[in-house]
Every structure is written in structure tokens, then in C-alpha cells.
Image (cartoon, helix red, strand yellow):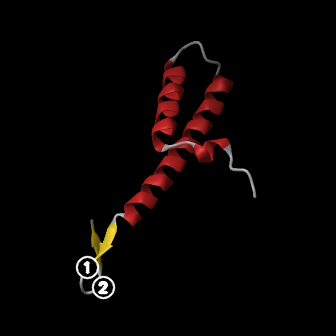
């Protein structure tokens, strides 16, 4: 069985908290330009993962009606 990456195991809430931390560090004047690029890239990856998880949940929130048609929950 393949091991999951650490970032894939995070919940949406954990990822959003990490994003907040990244934003705080990026707003700090004490970060180097090189580090800010790295952190920006990490933040974009976290944002992409959150978006994918939310899309998955939204798709699961559809329900089938009496006619076999999907409608929003």
C-alpha cells in the first residue's frame, strides 16, 4: 500500500489554518524574497487541494429524485 503524502492527509480546516499562517508570514517584512516565492507556491498547492476537496463534497451533495434525476441536496 502506498503511503499518502502529508498534504493529502490534511483536513480542509487544517489546510486553511496553514494557509492563514502562510499569509501572515508573507505579510511580514522579515521574510526573504526567495522564501516568499516558496511559501506562495505552498499556499497555491494547499488552495488547490482545498478546492478539489470542496468540489468532491459538492458532487456528493446531489441527490436523486423520484424520476432518477439529480438535484441539489
* Place of residue 10 in the rendered image (x, y in percent of width and height, measured from the top left): 56, 42
Q: Quadrant of the C terminus?
A: bottom left
Q: Nearer the viewer, residue 46 or 5?
A: 5
The secondary structure type at the circle numbered 2 is: loop
Judged from this view, the residue extending furthest toward the top is: 30
* Quarter occupied by residue 58: bottom left
Q: Measure the alpha-carbon separation of dots 2 and 1.
A: 5 Å
Q: Is residue 51 left or right of residue 31?
A: left
Does the residue at mark 2 contact the one at mark 1 (Cβ under 8 Å)?
A: yes
Q: Residue at x 61, y 37 (%)?
A: 42
* Place of residue 29 in the rendered image (x, y in percent of width and height, measured from the top left): 54, 14
Q: Residue at x 66, y 25 (%)?
A: 35
Residue 17, label in figure: none
- Up the image or down, 48 lies above or below 60; here it is above
Q: Nearer the viewer, residue 16 or 4?
A: 4
Q: Residue at x 34, y 63 (%)?
A: 61
Q: Quadrant of the N terminus?
A: bottom right
Q: Which residue is mark 2?
A: 68
* Place of residue 65 in the rendered image (x, y in percent of width and height, measured from the top left): 25, 79
Q: Which residue is mark 1?
A: 65
Q: Is residue 59 left or right of residue 5?
A: left
Amino acid at each position: 500500500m502506498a503511503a499518502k503524502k502529508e498534504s493529502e492527509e490534511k483536513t480542509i480546516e487544517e489546510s486553511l489554518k496553514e494557509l492563514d499562517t502562510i499569509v501572515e508570514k508573507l505579510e511580514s517584512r522579515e521574510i526573504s524574497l526567495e522564501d516568499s516565492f516558496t511559501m506562495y507556491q505552498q499556499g497555491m498547492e494547499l488552495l488547490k487541494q482545498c478546492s478539489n476537496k470542496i468540489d468532491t463534497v459538492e458532487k456528493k451533495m446531489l441527490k436523486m429524485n423520484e424520476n432518477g434525476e439529480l438535484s441539489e441536496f
